[in-house]
C-alpha cells in the first residue's frame, strides 16, 4: 500500500476487493443510474451486501452522472455505501468534470455523515470506458483539491482492480504532490 497526505487527508492506494475493506466506514459503488445490481463493482457490492441494499436503493433512483447518494452497508462490513454514477466515456460530457463531481460529491456525503475512512474503486474505468490513466489523474486531483474542505474524512483509499490501475493512480499521486 502507498500513502500520501494532502491537507490532512491520507490517500491510500492498494490492489484489492472493494467489498473487503472492513476498516472503511463507507465504500463507494460505481453505480448505474437505477442503482441496481449489475456487472463489475456494482454487482460485487450488491452480492456482498445482500438484497436489502437493492431495496434501500430503489426509491433513491434514478441518479444522474456526477451525483451521489448514501445508504446503509447491510451485510457488508461497512456502515455505509455511497453510490455514484460515473460518466460513460465519449457519451457523457464534460467527462472529466462529471468524474470529478463523483469524487467530490461522494466525499461531501461522507463528511456530512461524519465518516473518517472512505474506499473508492476507479470510477468509470470499467464498462464505462474511461481511460484509467486519465481517470486516475481526475480522481487524485479532485481528492487533493477537496481535502481542505473535509472535516471528518481523514482517509481516502483507492481500491484498485489490478496493477495497471494501481500504477496509474500512483503516477497521479506523484503528479499531484506539491513540488518543493
Image (cartoon, rainbow, N blue to C red):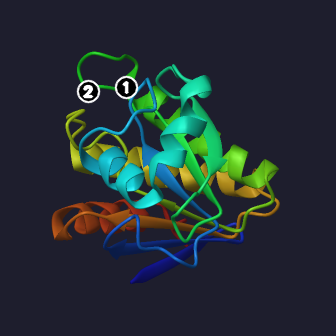
Check disc 2 and report the residue beneath it: 89
Q: Secondary structure at mark 2?
A: loop
Where is residue 166 drawn, in percent x and y? 27, 68
Where is residue 138 drawn, in percent x and y? 42, 44
Within 10 Å of disc 1 (Cα), the crowding (few <14, some 14-19, many 20+) is many
Closest to the observer: 53 or 135?
53
Closest to the observer: 21 or 149?
21
Where is residue 164 drawn, in percent x and y? 17, 64
Q: Secondary structure at mark 1?
A: helix
Query: Residue at left 40%, top 49%?
Result: 46
Query: Residue at left 29%, top 38%?
Result: 38
Closest to the observer: 173 or 20?
20
Where is residue 122 drawn, in percent x and y? 35, 52
Looking at the image, residue 31 lies above or below residue 74 = above
- For the N terminus, the quadrant is bottom left
Check disc 1 and report the residue beneath it: 95
Closest to the observer: 11 or 128?
128
Instruction: Give residue 36's quadrant in the image.
Output: top left
Query: Residue at left 39%, top 64%?
Result: 18
| Image position of 12 (left or right of 127) | right
Distance (Cα) linking label 2 and label 1 = 6 Å
> Outermost residue, bottom direction?
1
Dot 2 or dot 1: first in sequence order is 2
Within 10 Å of disc 2 (Cα), the crowding (few <14, some 14-19, many 20+) is some
Q: Which numbered dot is residue 5? A: none
- For the C terminus, the quadrant is bottom right
Query: Residue at left 52%, top 46%?
Result: 53
Query: Badges 2 and 1: C-beta atoms under 8 Å apart?
Result: yes
Amino acid at each position: 500500500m502507498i500513502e500520501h497526505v494532502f491537507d490532512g487527508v491520507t490517500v491510500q492506494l492498494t490492489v484489492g476487493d472493494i467489498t473487503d475493506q472492513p476498516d472503511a466506514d463507507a465504500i463507494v459503488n460505481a453505480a448505474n443510474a437505477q442503482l441496481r445490481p449489475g456487472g463489475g463493482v456494482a454487482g460485487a457490492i450488491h452480492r456482498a451486501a445482500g438484497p436489502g441494499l437493492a431495496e434501500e436503493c430503489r426509491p433513491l433512483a434514478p441518479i444522474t452522472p456526477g451525483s451521489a447518494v448514501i445508504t446503509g452497508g447491510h451485510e457488508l462490513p461497512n456502515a455505509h455505501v455511497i453510490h455514484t454514477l460515473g460518466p460513460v466515456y465519449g457519451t457523457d460530457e464534460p467527462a472529466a468534470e462529471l468524474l470529478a463531481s463523483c469524487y467530490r460529491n461522494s466525499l461531501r456525503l461522507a463528511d456530512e455523515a461524519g465518516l473518517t475512512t472512505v474506499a473508492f474503486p476507479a470510477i468509470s474505468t470499467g464498462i464505462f470506458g474511461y481511460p484509467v490513466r486519465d481517470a486516475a489523474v481526475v480522481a487524485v486531483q479532485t481528492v487533493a483539491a477537496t481535502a481542505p474542505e473535509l472535516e471528518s474524512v481523514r482517509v481516502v483509499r483507492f481500491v484498485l482492480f489490478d496493477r495497471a490501475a494501481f500504477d496509474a493512480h500512483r503516477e497521479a499521486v506523484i503528479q499531484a504532490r506539491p513540488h518543493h
